[in-house]
Image (cartoon, helix red, strand yellow):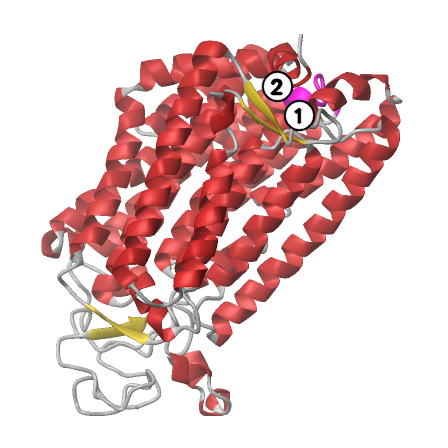
Amino acid sequence: MNALVPLPVLLPLCVTGLKLAIGPRLHRLQRFISIAVLGAVLVLSVLLMVAADRHGPLSVHLGDFAPPVGITLVADRLAGLMLTVSSAVTLLVLVYSLGQGMADRDDQAPVGVFHPAYLILVAGVSCTFLAGDLVNLYVGFEIMLVASFVLLTIGGTATRIRAGSTYVIISLFSSVLFLIAIAMTYAVAGTVNLAQLAQRLQEVPLGVRTLLEAMLLTVFAIKAAVFPLAAWLPDSYPTAPAPVTAVFAGLLTKVGVYSMLRTQTLLFPGHRLGDLLMLAALASMVVGILGAVAQTDLKRVLSFTLISHIGYMVFGIALAGHGSISGAIVYVAHHITVQTTLFLVAGLIERRDGTTEITRLGGLARAAPLLAVLFFVPAMNLAGIPPLSGFIGKLGLMRAGIDAGGAWAWALVAGSAATSLLTLYVMAKVWNLAFWRDAPPGAEEEGVVLESAEDDEPGDDEEGNDEEGGGATGSSEPTGPGRAAGSGKAAGSGAPTGSGSDLPVPAGAVVAAGFLGQSITTTKRLPWPMLAATGAAVALGLSYTVLGGPLTTFTQAAATELLARTPYIEAVLGR
């Protein structure tokens, strides 16, 4: 079974080379290979999770080189669960993207861009979950960075390039800091293998150990978008296409949380920075949700709730008790799924109505009841309404805070309750404006150009097209109902669309930004793969409620294993 451990990393990387060789040709084969590979990764992840639960952590030393020389990959209960949830989510997002027509437009690129970049991203995520040393954890982050920059800027529009540049600058800064932390760790301990560090760091002077802990926490807090290191996120994620935003919001920040959870329990037990983490958790929850309250664009609302709910996970890590670690693991799995689902729903709304600005929406509960259900269930799950999985995770964390006692713990319990209520308020506001109320005047008119390749041509800024119609999909600045960006004429009137085509906007159609920055026609009749993938994501979130007992038992065992440390160390170094 140990031989299966590297496959979730190696399989997507190897297939990426094949897909680059295929290039933009053979579209059906491209789609089939991508779905087959992610399906295989999902099966492997389930097998590893079950094996780790039954037999303890699995480890493999690539090339049969023993630590600290060789590359070590380890799959314990935590890594197996994270792999399984992330594999299921990435598979669903891929199906959604195929329905949106993103990957279908690969023939317009010099090579097939989306499929290889997406598989590389999956490989990077798997590498971080399985990494048994700091260097390969860093490598996993860098693999994700390369792939995510491609996906974030896909289409090459000015707004996406600006947002992508901010994301890359922040990521590169954290990467440099990570390299410095790795070098310092090796200098004081003579190894970067996590199992060996768990033994040797206890002999390092307390001040040096605290400095290393602070540096690693800073790196992972940037990756996880923990306040006050989260300012980059609300402006970066909403600009990307809906499937890209969904997988970023669901997975990339949780990789940072996972790294915090792994290093704090394995390398720094009884850590001295618990109070600082509690402060960061409380600030993330409160500031994030207040930011969400102030937004009127659904994608930005969800981006701020993402920051806010990262605070719950940091809450569990900061308390460092058995119940809090178990609750944090439950909440990570829950939030990956629910946050991804909500961004997929935002993409459906944008596909249908041409905007995610909730003040311009209305009547969706009557006009699109299925879409209303797909939003309502994960929205209530995010808010923590009983008996959904969001409630299970929050209840576990709050009980752990009450058991821990102390001023900070009680402050976090109060902050958690207030954040949950404000999350419910935010979701209710979105529901009332976008779904429950009658559609505002003009909301049913169509022909809004959100973004197009031609809006980013030189000279457009002088005419104001970039401000009025060339913003990103998540910018919430379309030209207005019934108008075509840059044309100054009503859609359907035969005016140019400004979308890189001389054809008029068809009557009864909305033109929105596509995969390569070129226009795609949105429709009231949503593509079935998008609906099916979103429905499956909703069902996956609900399955955590149905399987709440086994899930809680599993996470409690994972928490026991993490806090004991011995099973992980023995699996890597031998008994």
- Magenta segment: 264-272
Q: Is 271 in the magenta?
A: yes
**In the foreground, 433 or 104:** 104
Crowding at mark 2 (Cα within 10 Å: few <14, some 14-19, many 20+) = many
Q: Is 120 in the magenta?
A: no
Give the SS element for disc 1. Answer: helix
Q: Which mark is residue 264?
A: 1
Q: Is residue 134 left or right of residue 509?
A: right
Percent x, y for residue 188? 87, 29
Question: Residue at image x 20%, y 59%?
Answer: 362
Q: Are marks 2 and 1 in contact (CB under 8 Å)?
A: yes
Percent x, y for residue 545? 29, 23
Question: Which corner quadrant holds the C terminus?
Answer: top right
Question: Residue at image x 35%, y 76%?
Answer: 518
Q: Is residue 57 left or right of residue 270?
A: left
Question: Residue at image x 52%, y 55%?
Answer: 147
**In the foreground, 497 or 154:** 154
Give the SS element for disc 2. Answer: loop
Percent x, y for residue 17? 47, 55
Q: Is residue 416 above or below residue 433?
A: above
Amino acid at the residue labelled 2: Ala
Give the mark nearer the N terminus: 2 vs 1: 1
Q: Is residue 8 above or below residue 152?
A: above
Percent x, y for residue 358? 30, 59
Q: Is residue 491 above or below residue 520?
A: below
Most common secondary structure along the magenta stretch:
loop
Q: Is residue 230 visible?
A: no
**In the foreground, 2 or 386:** 2
Q: Nearer the viewer, mark 2 or mark 1?
A: 1
Amino acid at the residue labelled 1: Gln
Residue on which the image places disc 2 = 320
